[in-house]
Amino acid sequence: MRIDIISAVPDLLASPLSHSIMQRAQDKGLLEVVIHNLREYGIGKHRQIDDYQYGGGAGLVMMIEPISILIEKLKAQRAYDEVIYMTPDGQLYEQSHANELSTYENIIILCGHYKGVDQRIRDIYITREISIGSYVLSGGELGAAVLVDSIGRLIPGVLNDGSSALFDSFQDDLLAPPIYTRPANYKGAVVPDILLSGDDGKIEQWRQEKSYQSTRERRPDLLDN
Protein backbone atom coordinates (compact mmCIF):
# COMPACT_ATOMS: atom_id res chain seq x y z
CA MET A 1 0.00 0.00 0.00
CA ARG A 2 1.22 3.50 -0.82
CA ILE A 3 0.13 6.69 0.93
CA ASP A 4 1.22 10.08 -0.42
CA ILE A 5 0.89 12.97 2.04
CA ILE A 6 0.90 16.58 0.85
CA SER A 7 1.97 19.03 3.55
CA ALA A 8 3.09 22.62 4.01
CA VAL A 9 5.10 21.55 7.09
CA PRO A 10 6.31 17.99 6.34
CA ASP A 11 8.67 17.88 9.32
CA LEU A 12 5.63 17.47 11.58
CA LEU A 13 5.08 14.03 10.05
CA ALA A 14 8.61 12.67 10.28
CA SER A 15 8.59 11.35 13.84
CA PRO A 16 5.12 9.76 14.10
CA LEU A 17 5.67 7.73 10.93
CA SER A 18 9.28 6.65 11.52
CA HIS A 19 8.95 4.64 14.72
CA SER A 20 7.33 1.52 16.14
CA ILE A 21 4.67 -0.27 14.09
CA MET A 22 4.62 2.25 11.23
CA GLN A 23 8.37 1.93 10.74
CA ARG A 24 8.11 -1.88 10.83
CA ALA A 25 5.37 -1.79 8.21
CA GLN A 26 7.59 0.26 5.92
CA ASP A 27 10.68 -1.86 6.60
CA LYS A 28 8.68 -4.97 5.62
CA GLY A 29 7.64 -3.33 2.37
CA LEU A 30 3.97 -3.56 3.30
CA LEU A 31 3.44 0.19 3.52
CA GLU A 32 5.08 3.02 1.62
CA VAL A 33 4.56 6.54 2.95
CA VAL A 34 5.81 9.40 0.79
CA ILE A 35 5.68 12.90 2.26
CA HIS A 36 5.64 15.76 -0.23
CA ASN A 37 6.71 19.28 0.70
CA LEU A 38 4.14 21.54 -0.93
CA ARG A 39 6.57 24.47 -0.91
CA GLU A 40 8.61 22.72 -3.59
CA TYR A 41 5.66 23.43 -5.88
CA GLY A 42 5.09 26.99 -4.68
CA ILE A 43 4.69 29.93 -7.02
CA GLY A 44 7.43 32.43 -7.86
CA LYS A 45 10.82 33.13 -6.33
CA HIS A 46 9.50 32.78 -2.79
CA ARG A 47 7.64 29.50 -3.43
CA GLN A 48 4.34 31.02 -2.34
CA ILE A 49 1.62 28.53 -1.38
CA ASP A 50 -0.91 30.82 0.35
CA ASP A 51 -2.64 34.13 -0.24
CA TYR A 52 -5.35 36.42 1.14
CA GLN A 53 -9.02 35.53 0.82
CA TYR A 54 -11.16 37.00 -1.91
CA GLY A 55 -13.91 39.02 -0.24
CA GLY A 56 -11.77 39.73 2.82
CA GLY A 57 -11.62 37.90 6.11
CA ALA A 58 -9.03 36.72 8.61
CA GLY A 59 -6.53 34.03 7.73
CA LEU A 60 -4.58 33.00 4.65
CA VAL A 61 -5.79 30.37 2.19
CA MET A 62 -3.72 27.63 0.56
CA MET A 63 -3.57 28.43 -3.16
CA ILE A 64 -5.04 26.17 -5.82
CA GLU A 65 -2.06 26.11 -8.20
CA PRO A 66 0.68 24.41 -6.12
CA ILE A 67 -1.72 21.72 -4.87
CA SER A 68 -3.15 21.14 -8.35
CA ILE A 69 0.30 20.76 -9.89
CA LEU A 70 1.35 18.18 -7.29
CA ILE A 71 -1.86 16.15 -7.36
CA GLU A 72 -1.83 16.07 -11.17
CA LYS A 73 1.79 14.89 -11.10
CA LEU A 74 0.97 12.06 -8.70
CA LYS A 75 -2.15 11.00 -10.58
CA ALA A 76 -0.15 10.81 -13.81
CA GLN A 77 2.08 8.20 -12.16
CA ARG A 78 -0.56 5.86 -10.71
CA ALA A 79 -4.27 5.47 -10.04
CA TYR A 80 -5.49 6.51 -6.60
CA ASP A 81 -8.41 4.98 -4.73
CA GLU A 82 -9.00 8.13 -2.67
CA VAL A 83 -7.78 11.72 -2.45
CA ILE A 84 -8.48 12.65 1.16
CA TYR A 85 -8.55 16.13 2.67
CA MET A 86 -8.05 16.45 6.42
CA THR A 87 -10.48 19.13 7.63
CA PRO A 88 -12.53 19.85 10.78
CA ASP A 89 -15.74 19.93 8.71
CA GLY A 90 -15.14 16.51 7.17
CA GLN A 91 -16.75 13.17 7.99
CA LEU A 92 -15.98 12.08 11.55
CA TYR A 93 -13.41 9.28 11.34
CA GLU A 94 -14.37 5.86 12.70
CA GLN A 95 -12.88 2.38 12.82
CA SER A 96 -15.04 1.20 9.94
CA HIS A 97 -13.42 3.85 7.72
CA ALA A 98 -9.94 2.62 8.72
CA ASN A 99 -11.00 -0.93 7.84
CA GLU A 100 -12.15 0.20 4.41
CA LEU A 101 -9.12 2.36 3.64
CA SER A 102 -6.71 -0.43 4.64
CA THR A 103 -7.92 -2.47 1.65
CA TYR A 104 -6.90 0.19 -0.88
CA GLU A 105 -3.71 0.31 -2.93
CA ASN A 106 -2.96 4.03 -3.24
CA ILE A 107 -4.18 7.04 -1.26
CA ILE A 108 -3.35 10.74 -1.29
CA ILE A 109 -3.83 12.73 1.92
CA LEU A 110 -3.88 16.53 1.68
CA CYS A 111 -3.13 18.34 4.94
CA GLY A 112 -4.90 21.64 5.36
CA HIS A 113 -3.05 24.58 6.88
CA TYR A 114 -3.63 28.27 7.59
CA LYS A 115 -7.35 28.97 7.08
CA GLY A 116 -7.73 25.99 4.74
CA VAL A 117 -7.53 25.29 1.02
CA ASP A 118 -9.10 27.05 -1.95
CA GLN A 119 -12.57 25.51 -2.32
CA ARG A 120 -11.84 24.61 -5.94
CA ILE A 121 -9.33 21.99 -4.76
CA ARG A 122 -12.09 20.34 -2.76
CA ASP A 123 -14.50 20.53 -5.67
CA ILE A 124 -12.14 19.19 -8.34
CA TYR A 125 -9.79 16.73 -6.66
CA ILE A 126 -10.97 15.62 -3.23
CA THR A 127 -12.94 12.38 -3.07
CA ARG A 128 -13.32 12.19 0.72
CA GLU A 129 -13.05 14.71 3.55
CA ILE A 130 -12.17 13.43 7.01
CA SER A 131 -12.12 14.94 10.52
CA ILE A 132 -10.58 13.18 13.51
CA GLY A 133 -12.70 15.15 15.97
CA SER A 134 -14.85 18.19 16.63
CA TYR A 135 -11.98 20.57 17.27
CA VAL A 136 -9.47 22.59 15.24
CA LEU A 137 -5.72 21.92 14.96
CA SER A 138 -3.05 24.15 13.45
CA GLY A 139 -2.94 21.90 10.40
CA GLY A 140 -3.92 18.51 9.05
CA GLU A 141 -0.57 16.83 9.67
CA LEU A 142 -1.40 15.30 13.05
CA GLY A 143 -4.70 14.09 11.68
CA ALA A 144 -2.91 12.56 8.69
CA ALA A 145 -0.53 10.74 11.05
CA VAL A 146 -3.54 9.35 12.94
CA LEU A 147 -5.04 8.20 9.66
CA VAL A 148 -1.87 6.46 8.48
CA ASP A 149 -1.35 4.72 11.82
CA SER A 150 -4.95 3.47 12.01
CA ILE A 151 -4.80 2.19 8.42
CA GLY A 152 -1.28 0.79 8.44
CA ARG A 153 -1.71 -1.45 11.47
CA LEU A 154 -4.59 -3.22 9.71
CA ILE A 155 -2.54 -4.26 6.68
CA PRO A 156 -1.99 -8.04 6.82
CA GLY A 157 1.48 -8.86 8.12
CA VAL A 158 2.10 -5.53 9.87
CA LEU A 159 1.21 -6.69 13.39
CA ASN A 160 3.09 -9.67 14.77
CA ASP A 161 -0.23 -11.24 15.75
CA GLY A 162 -2.47 -10.72 12.77
CA SER A 163 -5.63 -11.38 14.77
CA SER A 164 -4.85 -8.70 17.36
CA ALA A 165 -6.45 -5.85 15.40
CA LEU A 166 -9.66 -7.81 15.05
CA PHE A 167 -10.29 -7.49 18.78
CA ASP A 168 -9.58 -3.78 19.15
CA SER A 169 -12.17 -1.39 20.51
CA PHE A 170 -14.80 -0.33 17.93
CA GLN A 171 -14.24 -3.30 15.60
CA ASP A 172 -17.65 -4.66 16.60
CA ASP A 173 -19.05 -1.34 17.88
CA LEU A 174 -17.97 -2.28 21.40
CA LEU A 175 -15.15 -1.11 23.62
CA ALA A 176 -12.47 -3.64 24.43
CA PRO A 177 -12.68 -5.58 27.72
CA PRO A 178 -10.16 -5.10 30.56
CA ILE A 179 -6.79 -6.77 30.01
CA TYR A 180 -4.20 -8.04 32.51
CA THR A 181 -0.72 -9.53 32.62
CA ARG A 182 1.75 -10.80 35.25
CA PRO A 183 1.89 -10.71 38.22
CA ALA A 184 -1.51 -12.16 39.07
CA ASN A 185 -1.43 -10.39 42.45
CA TYR A 186 0.18 -7.01 42.87
CA LYS A 187 -0.11 -5.55 46.36
CA GLY A 188 -3.57 -7.05 46.75
CA ALA A 189 -4.84 -6.02 43.32
CA VAL A 190 -5.62 -9.35 41.69
CA VAL A 191 -6.43 -10.61 38.23
CA PRO A 192 -10.01 -11.98 37.93
CA ASP A 193 -10.09 -15.71 38.60
CA ILE A 194 -11.87 -16.46 35.34
CA LEU A 195 -8.81 -15.37 33.35
CA LEU A 196 -6.67 -17.87 35.23
CA SER A 197 -9.15 -20.75 34.85
CA GLY A 198 -8.01 -21.99 31.44
CA ASP A 199 -11.64 -22.30 30.35
CA ASP A 200 -11.61 -20.60 26.94
CA GLY A 201 -15.39 -20.59 26.58
CA LYS A 202 -16.02 -18.91 29.92
CA ILE A 203 -13.18 -16.47 29.36
CA GLU A 204 -14.66 -15.40 26.03
CA GLN A 205 -18.09 -15.00 27.62
CA TRP A 206 -16.57 -12.89 30.40
CA ARG A 207 -14.83 -10.68 27.88
CA GLN A 208 -18.02 -10.16 25.90
CA GLU A 209 -19.94 -9.23 29.05
CA LYS A 210 -17.22 -6.79 30.11
CA SER A 211 -17.18 -5.23 26.64
CA TYR A 212 -20.92 -4.59 26.78
CA GLN A 213 -20.66 -3.26 30.33
CA SER A 214 -17.82 -0.89 29.46
CA THR A 215 -19.63 0.31 26.33
CA ARG A 216 -22.89 0.93 28.25
CA GLU A 217 -21.03 2.98 30.85
CA ARG A 218 -18.61 4.93 28.62
CA ARG A 219 -20.00 5.03 25.09
CA PRO A 220 -23.71 4.10 25.12
CA ASP A 221 -24.06 5.77 21.71
CA LEU A 222 -22.18 2.84 20.18
CA LEU A 223 -24.91 0.43 21.21
CA ASP A 224 -27.31 2.26 18.90
CA ASN A 225 -25.41 0.64 16.03
Image (cartoon, helix red, strand yellow):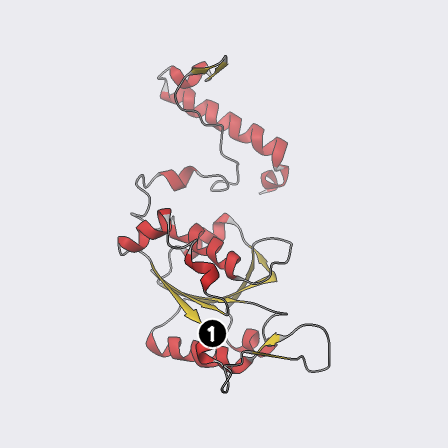
Please tell me which residue lies in front, 220 or 20.
20
- Residue 165 placement (x, y as % from top left): 39, 41
Hey, which residue is sitting farthest bottom in the picture? 44
Quarter of the image that includes the N terminus: bottom left
- The answer to which quarter of the image holds residue 32 is bottom left
- Residue 3 placement (x, y as % from top left): 39, 63
- Residue 103 placement (x, y as % from top left): 37, 56
Hey, which residue is sitting farthest left in the picture? 28
Left or right: 88 as drawn, with respect to 9: right
Please tell me which residue lies in front, 53 or 172.
53
Hey, which residue is sitting farthest right in the picture? 56
- At x 39%, y 16%, the residue is 196
Which residue is labeled 1 in the image?
A: 38
- At x 73%, y 82%, the residue is 55
- At x 29%, y 47%, the residue is 157
Asked which secondary structure carries label 1, the reply is helix
- At x 45%, y 59%, the residue is 13
Amino acid carrying mark 1 in the image: Leu
Q: Is residue 105 above or below residue 210?
A: below
- The answer to which quarter of the image holds residue 135 is bottom right
- Residue 209 placement (x, y as % from top left): 52, 25
Hey, which residue is sitting farthest top in the picture? 188
- The answer to which quarter of the image holds residue 72 is bottom left
Pointer 1 local density, CA inside 10 Å: few below 14, some 14–19, many at least 20: many
